Image (spheres, rainbow, N blue to C red):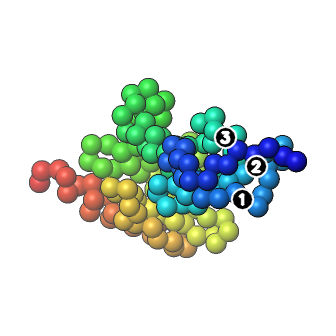
Amino acid sequence: MSHCIDLTNQRFGRLVVQNRADTVARNGNVCWNCVCDCGNHVVVEGYALRKGITRSCGCLRREVSRQNARTNERFLKAQGGALVNEDGVGYSSIIRSKRNHTGVIGVSFDKKSETYIARLMYHGRYVLNRATHSFDEAVALRQQAEERYFKKNQVE
């Protein structure tokens, strides 16, 4: 006869236990069906609930990580800083990477389709993402997009 602490209707962090789950953990511990404050349903081992190991469905970890990403200076420094310049242009769109084999920033060759791809990201969105069979056409598309999006910030 097994001894089981009834956790029904108890709150553990953001989780409220609904009832005992049909599943049992590999180590033999009882599992419980829980509802998180965010609305997600999860099955959690009773030991993890009682010891504070599991306090949410995962939403708490995501919120803490998101907050750290915005405010923790050490975290931001470890990430290498901003990925865009002050004009909202991604550094990947203005700096030639070591992986660039065409010699033109924003123009790559797709071996599978055997086409050149012209791309430009501006304010986190692709404003140019076109495929062409001509390298020269891809370069021209990229240059036109640069003139349209990069030059408009300059005084004429």
Q: Are marks 3 and 2 in contact (CB under 8 Å)?
A: no
Point out the tag, 2 or 1, that comes first from the N-terminus: 1
Q: Which residue is mark 1?
A: 21
Q: Are marks 2 and 1 in contact (CB under 8 Å)?
A: yes
Q: Give the quadrant of residue 141.
A: bottom left
Q: Nearer the viewer, residue 43 or 18?
A: 18
Residue 94 pos. (x, y %):
39, 47
Q: Which residue is mark 2?
A: 30
Q: Nearer the viewer, mark 3 or mark 2?
A: 2
In this rendering, the answer to whether 78 lies above or below 10 is: above
Amino acid type assigned to the residue bearing label 1 in the image: Ala
Q: Residue furthest left?
A: 156
Q: Are marks 3 and 1 in contact (CB under 8 Å)?
A: no
Image-based side of 60 in relation to 4, left or right: left
Determine if residue 74 is in view: yes
3D distance between C-alphas at marks 3 and 1:
14 Å
Which element type, helix, strand or loop, lies under badge 2?
strand
In this rendering, the answer to whether 129 lies above or below 81 is: below
* Quarter of the C terminus within the rendering: bottom left
